[in-house]
């Protein structure tokens, strides 16, 4: 009986030691999982104007600006893959020649360039008869999954021109500006921009449920409801119009944040114009779409879904300080922050740069 009791005690002690070992091991593993660090994440929305072909040396200027800005994630507008070439391969090779490793996959109209590996890419909202597109990519940022959407939305029925006295599809001068917001709204909905944004909202909500970070960059070819407000109705040829531009409003209602307006909420002091940009290398005839009007607007955006792992730090305009107003080159004098280019500028848009801090998991 005593011998059996001793054996039972030995088994109990052994079991305690084993359970203690696995308990400590499990605790150590859990401790590894919750360890995190913070890294800077710079996003650049860049309309590259027909892959930089309109400006002499434009393609290499695109490469130079990406390197100079140290952008991590770049959303590209106006990807064309001219002459049966692939822009993604040309970008990767050009960056490699400069000593930088970036990732990209083939796309059309909109595109993505990333300093971090692209795990998968989708032709999410395919371009159809040049009515705009959205490219989507799953990117591994040091172990954190980021879904990046790149939008180049429909340029036709560009209704921001109507209050300025021009047709938004032909850019012919109208007999008079159209200032009825119902007429402007109806024209705006004839584009396919709303279909693209609705598809993005629906898809991104699914990705959020998977625990992924969501960022959207793009040339919307549409203004923001945060910019056409009571305080600006008599500025920039708005001609008294206060307009709830549909697509930024829908993003707002869905919970997405306009990074530039989060940093600079006042459109009077910080209008953040991205188009039309002055480009000294290009004749005015190629830059002025409505030569008798002031058609400056903020149509390039970076949006993000609020997430405790993603902290917004800063935003600025990348490109020339000059704009085009009534067929003249003018310098902007308001309080927007400009990151001026080195050498020639490759496009008729200004780019938007946003700095985040991303909290990522760290394994020991």
Image (spheres, grey):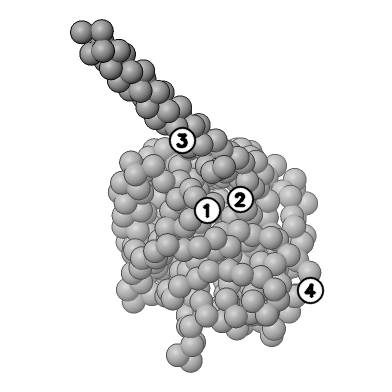
Q: Earlier in the sequence, mark 4 or mark 1?
A: 1
288, above or below 308, in the image: below
Instruction: Tell me the residue that label 3 is attached to.
Output: 29
- Give the camera-side residue of 201 and 63: 63
Residue neighbourhood size for the residue with mark 2, other residues' Cα within 10 Å, grouped as few (<14), some (14–19), many (≥20): many
Mark 1 and mark 2: Cα distance apart in space: 9 Å
Front position among marks 4 and 1: 1
Q: Earlier in the sequence, mark 3 or mark 1?
A: 3
Instruction: Tell me the residue that label 1 is attached to.
Output: 141
Identify the secondary structure beneath mark 1.
strand
x and y percentages locating residue 15 in the rendered image: 33, 22
x and y percentages locating residue 326 in the rendered image: 66, 66
Q: Earlier in the sequence, mark 1 or mark 2?
A: 2
Is residue 50 toward the left or the right of residue 353 in the image? left
Mark 3 and mark 1: Cα distance apart in space: 22 Å
- Give the camera-side residue of 340 and 89: 89
> CB atoms at circles 3 and 2 under 8 Å apart?
no
x and y percentages locating residue 39 in the rendered image: 63, 46
- Give the camera-side residue of 338 and 311: 311
Whether residue 223 is visible, yes or no, is no
262, above or below 134, in the image: above
The image quadrant where one finds the N terminus is top left
Residue neighbourhood size for the residue with mark 3, other residues' Cα within 10 Å, grouped as few (<14), some (14–19), many (≥20): few
Q: What's the residue at 42%, 28% (across, down)? A: 21
Instruction: Tell me the residue that label 4 is attached to.
Output: 343
> CB atoms at circles 1 and 2 under 8 Å apart?
yes
Instruction: Tell me the residue that label 2 is attached to.
Output: 41
x and y percentages locating residue 85 in the rendered image: 49, 88
35, above or below 89, in the image: above
């Amino acid at each position: 009986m005593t011998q059996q009791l001793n054996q039972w005690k030995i088994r109990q002690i052994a079991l305690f030691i084993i359970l203690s070992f696995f308990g400590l091991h499990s605790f150590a593993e859990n401790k590894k999982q919750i360890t995190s660090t913070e890294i800077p994440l710079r996003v650049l929305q860049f309309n590259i104007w027909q892959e930089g072909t309109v400006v002499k040396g434009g393609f290499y200027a695109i490469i130079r600006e990406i390197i100079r800005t140290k952008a991590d994630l770049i959303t590209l507008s106006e990807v064309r893959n001219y002459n049966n070439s692939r822009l993604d391969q040309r970008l990767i090779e050009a960056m490699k020649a400069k000593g930088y490793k970036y990732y990209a996959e083939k796309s059309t109209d909109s595109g993505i360039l990333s300093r971090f590996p692209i795990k998968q890419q989708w032709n999410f909202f395919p371009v159809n008869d040049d009515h705009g597109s959205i490219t989507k990519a799953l990117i591994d940022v040091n172990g954190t999954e980021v879904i990046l959407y790149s939008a180049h939305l429909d340029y036709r029925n560009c209704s921001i021109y109507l209050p300025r006295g021009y047709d938004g599809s032909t850019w012919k001068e109208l007999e008079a500006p159209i200032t009825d917001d119902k007429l402007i709204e109806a024209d705006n909905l004839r584009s396919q921009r709303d279909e693209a944004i609705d598809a993005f909202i629906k898809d991104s909500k699914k990705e959020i449920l998977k625990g992924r970070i969501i960022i959207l960059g793009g040339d919307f070819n549409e203004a923001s409801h945060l910019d056409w407000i009571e305080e600006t109705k008599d500025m920039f040829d708005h001609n008294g119009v206060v307009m709830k531009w549909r697509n930024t409003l829908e993003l707002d209602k869905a919970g997405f944040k306009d990074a530039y307006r989060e940093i600079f909420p006042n459109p009077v002091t910080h209008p953040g114009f991205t188009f039309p940009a002055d480009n000294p290398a290009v004749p005015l005839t190629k830059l002025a779409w409505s030569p008798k009007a002031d058609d400056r607007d903020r149509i390039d955006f970076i949006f993000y879904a609020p997430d405790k792992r993603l902290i917004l730090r800063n935003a600025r305009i990348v490109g020339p300080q000059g704009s085009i107003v009534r067929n003249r080159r003018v310098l902007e004098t308001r309080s927007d922050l400009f990151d001026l280019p080195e050498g020639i500028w490759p496009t008729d848009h200004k780019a938007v740069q946003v700095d985040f801090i991303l909290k990522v998991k760290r394994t020991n």
